[in-house]
Image (cartoon, helix red, strand yellow):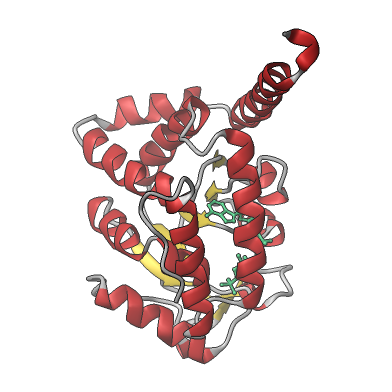
Amino acid sequence: NAVIPPTHPRYRSLLEREKVVEGAKEGYVALQGLIAQGRGECFDYLIGEETQSFAMKAMEAAAAALLLAKHPVISVNGNVAALTPREVVQLAEAVPALIEVNLFYRTREREEKIAEILRRHGAVKVLGVGEDASCTIPELFSERRRVSCEGIYKADVVLVPLEDGDRTEALRRMGKTVIAIDLNPLSRTAQAASITIVDNVTRAMPKLVEAVKAMKALDRGQLAQILERYDNKKTLADALRHILKRLEQLANSLDPRNA
Ligand code: PTJ
């Protein structure tokens, strides 16, 4: 176990990396999840490791969609269980929404370990474990096609932090509203989701919990208006422009020819 001093300039990022590594050692984070985390870190550098306004806007729309939903479900994989188990449970309580374990690299052992982590953080009911995942998402060939009939299969709104593109597209084809949290605005998930929060799950999840709590005071008409005005293509364009502008500024500040 690496000891990271809190004074380290990259303390937060290193701590998160350790959590994912620990999860892999304990056998519930997929090895591919380590690669995913590294890819996320790279995009977090590019956006500036802070929640940006395009993510806040997407979060507001996401909170509205969750509060308006008839049957909202939060999908949890290995990385999410390692990084934000407490916030998953808090969000499920605040909405309220169901929690379902749904893995790309599915094994019974990982499902059970993840469900146990969520229960340890206060989850009363966790769907998607073992025989509970007996419904199938059409046209999907990964193990992620197996879902709970009471959960994702029936859901009208699904929150999928760190998702793969194929399933996002398949869920959209089933007519569901898909909310993704993905640091990469170019990923197929980010492009295919109804609402994409381009931010680190560790920053986005607590903010989403707060947004849901604050927006509970709004009536359905106001929530519907927020959702209607939201445009995901604009969010993705804003995220890319933010990276472009930031890199331009950084390059200019480094360039001796500008001195
Ligand atoms: O636990 P499993 O079996 O369901 O597997 C989970 C992973 C993440 C391994 C699986 O879904 C996968 O392979 O995902 P991808 O296709 O690598 O996509 C992960 C996406 O999440 C990438 O676009 C990353 O940029 C992004 N990402 C990684 N870490 C974070 C992140 N986005 C937000 N916050 C992060 N901490």
Q: Position of residue 11 (x, y in %)?
A: 43, 52
- Check the picture and name the quadrant holding the C terminus: top right
Q: Is residue 157 above or below residue 129?
A: above
Number of marks in the rendered image: 0
Residue found 48% across the figure and 55% down from its top? 158
Q: Is residue 85 above or below residue 228?
A: below
Q: Position of residue 257 (x, y in %)?
A: 80, 11
Could you say which is closer to the camera, residue 110 or residue 26? 26
Could you say which is closer to the camera, residue 229 or residue 5? 5
Residue 90 seen from this side: yes
Could you say which is closer to the camera, residue 202 or residue 138? 202
Q: Position of residue 219 (x, y in %)?
A: 24, 30
Seen in the image, is 141 located left or right of residue 155? right
Q: Is residue 144 above or below residue 154?
A: below
Q: Residue furthest left?
A: 217
Q: Position of residue 155 (x, y in %)?
A: 45, 59
Seen in the image, is 184 located left or right of residue 153? right
Residue 34 is drawn in which quadrant?
Answer: bottom right
Could you say which is closer to the camera, residue 86 or residue 107? 86
In the image, ligand 1 is in what quadrant? bottom right
Residue found 56% across the figure and 41% down from its top? 196
Q: Residue furthest top?
A: 259
Residue found 44% across the figure and 50% down from its top? 8
Residue found 66% across the figure and 72% down from its top? 32
- Check the picture and name the quadrant holding the N terminus: bottom left
Residue 152 seen from this side: no
